[in-house]
Image (spheres, rainbow, N blue to C red):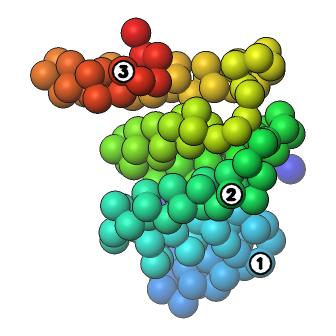
Amino acid sequence: MKAASIAEIKKQLVKLDQGELLEIALRLARFKKENKELLTYVLFLSENEAAYGGYLCEEIEEQFRASPNMHKKTLRKTIRVMDKCLRFSGSKETELTVRVYFCRSLISSETPFRDRKVMFNMYAGQIKKIKKLIDAYHEDLQHDYRREFQDLDLG
């Protein structure tokens, strides 16, 4: 089956009443864990974006505590979960905060990521995303952020 476009889906959803929309949302939540996680974010966590960012940072901290000397598989999993949760938010400030926290946690951990090419490339990918986020800000804020995050090798 070919999926309908977002515009087509929106047109159909507008026609439905509240009960039918509730039924569809619950049905979506049953089919995939990611749908349930997104609904949890939208319904319970989206009102306080700063708290959500703090929650994500705590999750990252927990991963580093559980495995202080991470292997590339564990590091890749942590990045994948972080990316998924940041997609739910869509907030650039939250994304910047969480990605910087991840990089700082990796630097302060016992993981010798600089010696391992694959792990260093994962770190470099996060730095690249941080630079892209900073470039989206106003020039004055860009300068401030670059100074604040110099220790991450933003260059």
Look at label 1 and name its amino acid: Arg
Which of the labelled discs sits on residue 150, or is there none? 3
Q: How far apart are marks 2 and 3 (CA)?
A: 25 Å
The mark nearer the N terminus, 1 or 3, is: 1
Taking depth in this image into account, of 123 and 47 the one nearest to the observer is 123
Give the percent coordinates (x, y) of residue 73. Answer: 86, 39
Look at label 3 and name its amino acid: Gln
Q: Which residue is drawn at 62% across and 76% down?
A: 25
User: Could you tell me which quadrant the C terminus lies in?
Assistant: top left
Q: Mark 1 points at which residue?
A: 30
Taking depth in this image into account, of 74 and 49 the one nearest to the observer is 74
* 155 to the left or right of 22: left
Secondary structure under the numbered disc 1 in the rendered image: helix
Look at label 2 and name its amino acid: Arg
The mark nearer the N terminus, 2 or 1, is: 1
Q: Which residue is drawn at 52% across and 23% down?
A: 127
Packing grade of label 2 (10 A; few <14, some 14-19, many >=20) is few
Q: Mark 2 points at which residue?
A: 65
Taking depth in this image into account, of 118 and 80 the one nearest to the observer is 118
Q: How far apart are marks 2 and 1 (CA)?
A: 32 Å
Packing grade of label 1 (10 A; few <14, some 14-19, many >=20) is few
